[in-house]
Amino acid sequence: MFVWTIVAGLALTIAAFLAGQSRAAGMRLSGGAALHSLPSYHGMYLGAAALSGAILAAILAALVLGSQSAALPVSAAAGAAIAAAALYSGIKPDFRARNMFERFVLGVLIACSGVAILTTVGIVFSVLFESIIFFREISVVSFLFGTQWSPTSTPASFGFLPLLVGTFLITAIAIAVAGPLGLFSAIYMAEYSSPKLRSVLKPLLEILAGIPTVVLGFFAALTVAPLIRNSGEAIGLSVASESALAAGLVMGMMIVPLISSLSDDIINAVPQSLRDGSYAMGATKSETIKRVVLPAALPGIVSAFMLAISRAVGETMIVVMAAGLAANLSINPLEAVTTITVQIATLLVGDQEFDSAKTLSAFALGFVLFLFTLALNYIALRIVQKYREQYD
Amino acid sequence: MTDLRADFIAKRYASERRFKFLGAAALGITALFLIFLVSDIVIKGFPAFFEHRVMMEVTVDPAKVDAAKPMAGDYDGLVNDAFRALYPNVTSRADRKALGGILSQGAADDLRAMVLADPGLIGKTLKVPALLSDDADLYFKGMQTGVKTAAGAGTLQIAQAGESYVITGDTKDIVQGQIIRANGGALRVTSLEGTTVLAEALVAPTTLNTATSGQWDILTLSVKETERRINDRQVVWMEQLRQSDSVGKTISWRFFTSGDSREAELAGIKGALVGSLFTVAVSLLLALPLGIAAAIYLEQFAPKNKLTDLIEVNINNLAAVPSIIFGLLGLAVFLNFFGLPRSAPLVGGLVLALLVLPTIIIAARAALKAVPPSITEAALGVGASKQQAVFQHVLPLAVPGILTGTILGLARAFGETAPLLMIGMVAFIADVPQGVNDAATVLPVQIYLWSDLPEIAFQSKTAAAIIVLMVVLFSLNAIAIYLRKRFERRW
């Protein structure tokens, strides 16, 4: 039915376009007053009316009769026909069809831009509603400060702290890896490398940035984790097979391109005059970078790190595949910890019952995750904006 | 005084060199990681593009395959009987089961395909390939255990003592655990007493004659029997196949032409690839017009006001929202509220469209911004309306840039996994989806599913699927770079 509804709507739209165009063209031929708009604009005006009528009628019919109803194509056609017929007689030589049509197009463009707002609203409401139901059953305090997370046991306990600590442990490892690597890469590319070398290095980092996280997760779980466990055992350490270290290391490598490309842009945005001033005082290149360029770029670099943290906290596949499921409250990187995203994924994979606290808790976790990353992104983006203005 | 100053300068230069080295080292480590990652996956995944099959003579018995209904024939029976006929002395139930473990459950697929293509073959004797099981396949790829065959030097006397065998003669090279093949049998060494070897029969010898030099050999297996999925008896049988030269290695087209399966040797990525195609197509159809329209509005028409600011902040934030949150959105809105089908590429496409929309908008805006204002001004100057100027002059010039950004967004959608887990695209689905409403999975999710399975063969398949995914992504990126190079215009 869906396909036929579209076919009916489009067919009548085209018919309306042809009708409007030929009526306007006929008026021009009959030698009356000059047309305000080209005939094709009259056609498009009528076509737009028909299309809107068809969509409106189809949506109304779907709401009243159900989305599988056989009457959908008929009602779409009827809607289009009525809308076009109503405006058909309005086509006159002095009718400002182009302006009307352009107003319609502008409306469509605005509506399309509004999808971004709709998406945010959709996200907020979808996590908020289920979270409210969840917090009716579980108190906010016991959620935020509980130290036990076992949603599947009876009685289930929903203490958020182990997940928070696990998430931050893995994020900290990732940033400890990605921070220096990304920053030094950016400094080298921006300040030292020749344009030729840069044209090799940049794609290299882009390749790393383009690797799907499921691939990195596979690599972390099947290559890096055993490597760490074996080398740990070789020096007498007991390492969990799903250690936080393996997931954190690989996640850190994933973030390197993000930090380096953002920092690279920011370092490049520092005005050359600052560097020249420093060189004129006799400073070496590294002294200039350390004492002039980096301090000038600091706000931007801080925001790059914030975006990196937000990315690490929200990353899912690497930790789902390489980190553990058991919620240990531990800051030992050699132990298995779990994260917010791992729990969301495991709680919602498979069959969900929307009346159980177990499923709802995933939405509460999603809510926390969304708020946290939103705050980080917002602050980081504001810092970048302020910083850009400063040197513009 | 001069010395001090020279020291000071030397120190500063040293620190300069250290600093530069740190930068190069950071890039070096990143490059090494990338090389390690890619080579690890290629080494793991490459063998999965090949499969081993055993060539056998099979008589297509009209009693088992009815010429009127060739679809319903008992091809499994035919192939299994033909395979067992190669090993006439395997009789015990356990042994027959172990022997059957060498062949795949889909071993008869090739025969069935041949007969269905040409029913005239019924009643004839054909040479057909039969697929080996994943374990046997791994054995022939050398991924189960190392095997060394050493020709026997000297003579052996073999005598039976109850259940076990006593071997004497030139036994100085023999150690415990080795398998001695002589007189049509295979004996596993259980213990050594001086030069006398005690052994048990894996395959009972047909005679107890003396074996002279060249008539016997020693098999040495590098992995203990308890630590591999193929037992010693199966090894002897497979070595027999190897000696008769009837095992062939071919490219595993099956990997590209079949859907998922519980049996590693039969599992393929076609279902996941088609599912990915549907999903990405849906998301592209939605995100591309929406993204371009939004970009045109924001870049060309939007007045500077609160609403525009709100939209811009929203887009920038959405670009950084964790992808799993989009999965929650899909689950709560598309599945629960609108009641769309679970696991369907339609829903996956919707979610991915919202996910890549900010990327496309940002790229399209950059492309529109790169078109110089003189173009618009010239159009306006000869009497075009603002919309005519934008749609007829600015937009066509921005198309290459928009296309590049779209392809990069497409690549992102193609590799995305987490949000699709939420909307049920993780089920085991053996069938290839036929439309956007069928239950399906996508390539990255298939990789995730396979990576969870314990069989080594599936690990290899996972890496192979990753190679396919990466090849697709690299091609998309290469197209984007080519387009950028080809159509890029400096104003």
Image (tube, rainbow, N blue to C red):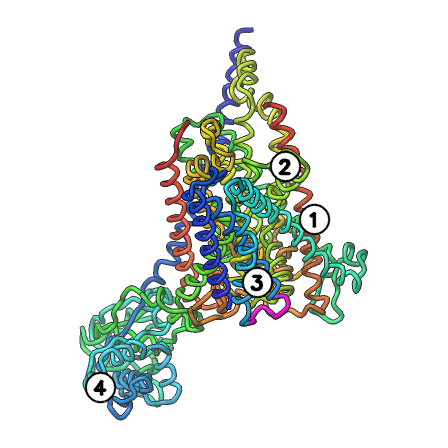
**What is the x, y in percent for residue B344?**
52, 65
- B55 relative to B436, above or below: below
Q: Measure the alpha-carbon separation of dots 4 and 2.
A: 72 Å
For label 4, the residue is: B122
Q: Which residues are magenta?
A: A63-69
Q: Which residue is pictured at 25% across the width and 72% down the height?
A: B247
Q: Which mark is residue A58?
A: 3
Q: Measure the alpha-carbon separation of dots 1 and 3.
A: 37 Å
- Same chain for the residues at labels 1 and 3, yes or no? yes
Q: Quadrant of residue B136?
A: bottom left
Q: Nearer the viewer, mark 4 or mark 3?
A: 3
Earlier residue among tags 3 and 2: 3
Asked whether the beta carbons under mark 4 and mark 3 sit within 8 Å of each other, the answer is no
For label 2, the residue is: A381
Q: Which mark is residue A371?
A: 1
Q: Quadrant of residue A233?
A: bottom right
Q: Measure the alpha-carbon separation of dots 2 and 1.
A: 15 Å
A64 drawn magenta: yes
Q: Measure the alpha-carbon separation of dots 4 and 3.
A: 57 Å
- Same chain for the residues at labels 4 and 3, yes or no? no
**What is the x, y in percent for residue A99?**
54, 40
